[in-house]
Image: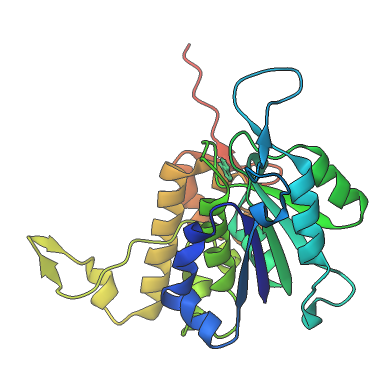
Amino acid sequence: MRVDVVSIFGEYLAPLSLSLIGKARTQGLLEVRVHDLREHTHDRHRTVDDTPYGGGAGLLMKPEPWGEALDAVLADPPESAGERGPVLLVPSPVGEVFTQVAAVELAAEPWLVFACGRYEGIDARVVEHYRARGVRVREVSLGDYVLNGGEVAVLVVVEAVARLLPGVVGNAASLAEESHASEHDGLLEHPAYTKPATWRGLDVPAVLSSGDHGAVARWRREQALRRTARRRPDLLARLDPARCGAADLAVLAEEGFVPGAHGFLPAAPAVAD
Ligand code: ADE
């Protein structure tokens, strides 16, 4: 996979040389190219921002340097990209929330291009222009909070995507078992323990040392369902009741959730007389 990142703070992306992502790069599984947006300015101050039309606080990024920078990146595709071209990712608090589903989709792409906005974001015509040219553009948000710029989001998205590429994570089975994995019905992962069996008076649940694989699997599924119900009931709204057995339904009922048309919903509260 090739990743191009356009930013005014390329140094922010230095962590992409570390750990498994750095190793994936040296192994040739991932190529990361960082481009300086200011190389595409033509004034003495290398200006990339300006005041917003209509007034308001803060500065916006001007479209011209972005147009030049992205045109230059798009003019140099990796061989693997073929006809489809890249997915242009624009981190923004107004984007779709980035999820594991999106990470899986992006991991199937040969080429990702990131446009890192700063200040109050990028002039809206930049996204409009590249969409009109047929580029697949996704504005992505890490969550419901505001960052100073897109670089941190690039670190997050590249890490979540690159670890799904074949050969990047040593044990591929571990990917299927973790939280949010589709194999796991999008549930949070069950709690996990390692040795020693007792630590500061706390015991590892006995079932995990029982050697009964069926019982371990049932316990883990129950824990995943309870955790998700308590911490992230929004994820249960997307859990297909058809993927739940009688034991699952009983656990979820205990946690106060009943099957609805598409996923699980909180049971209606009992009405007082
Ligand atoms: N840039 C500013 N805030 C952001 C957020 N929440 N997610 C992604 N990029 C951002």
**Residue at horizontal 60 percent and vertical 26 percent from the top:** 58
Work out which residue is located at the far top of the displayed protein and give it: 273
Work out which residue is located at the far bottom of the displayed protein and give it: 27
**Residue at horizontal 7 percent and vertical 61 percent from the top:** 200
Q: Nearer the viewer, residue 27 or 245?
A: 27
Direction from residue 227 to residue 112 in the image, left or right? right
Could you tell me residue 16's position as x and y percent?
49, 69
Colour treatment of the image: rainbow
- Quadrant where ligand 1 appears: top right
Q: Nearer the viewer, residue 271 or 64?
A: 64
Work out which residue is located at the far front of the displayed protein and give it: 44
**Residue at horizontal 70 percent and vertical 46 percent from the top:** 262
Which quadrant holds residue 206?
bottom left
Q: Is residue 220 visible?
A: yes
Q: Is residue 109 visible?
A: no
Q: Nearer the viewer, residue 220 or 173?
A: 173
Quadrant of the image containing the N terminus: bottom right
Could you tell me residue 84's position as x and y percent?
86, 69
Direction from residue 108 to residue 25 in the image, left or right? left
How many marks overall?
A: 0
Could you tell me residue 39's position as x and y percent?
67, 57
**Residue at horizontal 80 percent and vertical 51 percent from the top:** 67
Could you tell me residue 267's position as x and y percent?
54, 34
259 versus 99 height, above or below:
above
